Amino acid sequence: MFELKGFINNATFTNNSVAGGVAQIGELSQLSLTYSQDIGWYKSSLTEDCTLVSFKSASGDTFTQLTSNISDHVLTIAQGIFTYANTNGQIFSDTLLQWLLTTYGSVANTFTCGNIITDGTNYMPEWVAWSNTSIPAIQGSGGNAIKIWFVDASFQTEYDEYTIVVIPPIANLATFFQPASILQTALNAVLPADLFATIQAAKNGYPETILRCDTFNYIDPNNANTSIPTNWYTLIYGNAGNNVDAVGQAIINYILANSNQNQAAWTTIIPSLFLRTEFVILPLWTQYAIPNSNLQNGIYSPIANSAATLELLEQVDSGYATQHISANMTIMSHPYKSLAIASIGSPANKNSWFQLQQVFPDFLNILSTDNDFERMTQSTQGFANMLAQMLITAESMTAGSILPSGMTKMTRASILYLVQNYEGIYYLVAAKTNFPLS
């Protein structure tokens, strides 16, 4: 199947009132332009106001330049949507979709759209998607799937494609298998100016969405007490790539593609990359002691049935063996709205830390304002404060949410997680929007 994802710029909506100003509708921001290295710009004689900016134009993994019949088709429908919205004022999703099918049903079908938004004067859908039925697929079979955005803020949070470019700590990865002293000398020899030049060269002229640095400790295979921190930089094109799974896998792929050593050898010297320590935290979001009402929000129940919770955790946490989950699942209550929480550590965790109390044995179920809060160690206090903030955020976040600094989101096996790293361990809190599971 050929897939096109893009944005529609409309010259009549451009906001030039202030430096860096971006119209809420019909104008693409500079940040969004960093979301792909394969951007195409398309105009049509059929519409003078609209420009199609393509971010993904591909059959499978093969990039394909748009033909004029495809770009004309997209721009014609996009201009039609602008005209329809301008003519009708406030519009609604159901009537827009019916109009699209009535107007363009001979050349397209399966229309869907995002929420209707307004800039105070104009109304437009965040995006519209459809299948093209009038033009043969550019490559192969399966037709053409098209999705175009009209709202920059929605595009920034919803565009799900990304590219990750890896910059290693040193160019010659074989040095990692030299004695630890030689590796340390090689790492020390990389000056800030050298690193800057390497990063600039890796960009290859494409400004990145995010420049990220992840630190993984090298463990001397001859002396487990000797560790050396190594910094791995990544250039991320598209905000969807800014998550621990995507970045970690990109670094692993880079290492294996640029090394003569196999994964087992690398796992021995950088275990924190290849065997990431993580805990999945499952708040029991659907379990209420006092249900929501029209006047007040409900309060969660701290009482959990172990069998039902185990079944739910197995559904959420695909990837961990059932036997591992049943042997190591823990349930606890939390002061935030009397919430019950189940948790499980990855089978790959260092020190065989599979249960949360192994990491924080002095964790107390109390608020930070309680006099006993300081009886916990500083490390546990920090975790308690972080977990409280993560629960507050995960309760309301969606795939399009803008998150507090230090938190990222990712989707694993169709489950949306809020992710934060604390003292080298990743904590994945399942968002409330996932539930009830279908």
Image: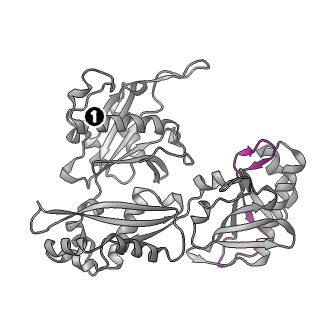
Q: Nearer the viewer, residue 348 or 380?
A: 380
**Residue 22: x and y, percent?**
69, 54
Magenta-highlighted residues: 113-142
Which of the image's four quarters has the N terminus? bottom right
Left or right, 352 with respect to 48, comes to: left
**Residue 398: x and y, percent?**
54, 44
Res 101 visible: no
Queried whether the magenta region covers residue 121, the answer comes back as yes
**Residue 395: x and y, percent?**
49, 36
Residue at image location 68% in from the left, 53% down from the top? 21
**Residue 246: x and y, percent?**
43, 61
Q: Quadrant of residue 189?
A: bottom left
Label 1: which secondary element: helix
Mark 1, residues whose alpha carbon is within 10 Å: few (<14), some, or many (≥20)? Answer: some
Residue at image location 74% in from the left, 50% down from the top? 125
**Residue type beneath disc 1:** Gln
Residue at image location 36% in from the left, 34% down from the top? 341
265 is higher (above) or lower (below) than 371: below
The residue tagged 1 is: 381
Residue at image location 47% in from the left, 43% down from the top? 404
* Display colour scheme: one colour
